[in-house]
Image: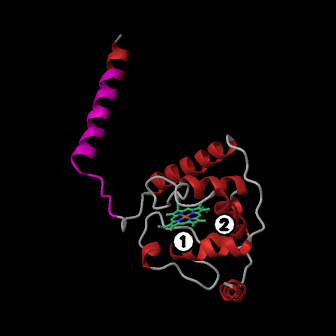
Amino acid sequence: MRFIAGFVSAFILLAIAGLAVVFGGLVNIAAREPHSAPVFFLLQTAMRQSVARQAASVPAPAPSTDMARGFRLYDETCVYCHGGPGKDPVDIGKGLNPEPPFLPDTIQRWSAAEIFWIVKNGVRMTGMPAFAESHSDEDLRAVVAFVQKLPGMSAEQYAAYEKEQ
Ligand code: HEC
């Protein structure tokens, strides 16, 4: 009986402490402040596991070969946050927390189905927008195919796509 009473009091104290942190404004939400290592780990892991689970429950998109269309969308809509070969992100991308990953370095950790899911649905509270309402699935399939080509793409190859437009 004493054990249960102790357990319940500890739980109530923890809940009060949690509410005090939230309502007392004790969390510094400035984007300039990095997350603490444990919070960053938890958020990143939750994001990766969620994408893997959600993407597994929908059919994988048919692969696209329309690189020109994928480039156009990437260069107009993604590059200012994510950067690209020979292109730094602009000030919007640099000021976000979490910082938008440099896709040529990171894209290989995701499958095509996962990239499609991320681009279509976005990632809540990170700055990564959902493009489902603004773009067709064909557009999104093309941008998935294009970002999968980014690793190893030189600045000259990226610029060559620009000239073809
Ligand atoms: C306003 C800035 C912004 C724009 C525009 C944007 N993104 Fe993102 N994106 C982000 C941020 C921030 C993250 C990190 C989310 C996280 O870590 O949970 C992200 C994550 C991603 C990821 C996961 C990358 C990884 O390695 O974890 C992919 C893939 C991605 N974006 C693709 C795109 C594509 C394709 C476009 C254009 C159609 C795009 N994004 C446009 C901000 C942006």
In the picture, measured across the screen, residue 109 lies left or right of residue 17, that is right
- Taking depth in this image into account, of 53 and 45 the one nearest to the observer is 53
Tell me the chief SS of the magenta region.
helix
In the picture, measured across the screen, residue 34 lies left or right of residue 41, that is left
- Taking depth in this image into account, of 132 and 78 the one nearest to the observer is 132
Q: Residue at x 68, y 63 (%)?
A: 144
Residue type, mark 1 in image:
Thr
Residue 26 appears in the picture as rendered: yes
Q: Is mark 2 within 8 Å of ligand 1?
A: yes
Color theme of the render: secondary structure
SS assignment at label 1: helix
* Residue picked out by circle 2: 143
Image location (x, y in percent) of residue 89: 51, 78
Q: Residue at x 30, y 58 (%)?
A: 28
Specify few, some or many for label 2: CA neighbours under 10 Å numbering under 14, 14-19, or 20 or more: many
Residue type, mark 2 in image:
Val
Q: Is mark 1 within 8 Å of ligand 1?
A: yes
In the picture, measured across the screen, residue 108 lies left or right of residue 131, that is right
Quadrant position of the N terminus in the picture? top left
Q: Is residue 74 above or below residue 139?
A: below
Mark positioned earlier in the residue sequence (2 or 1):
1
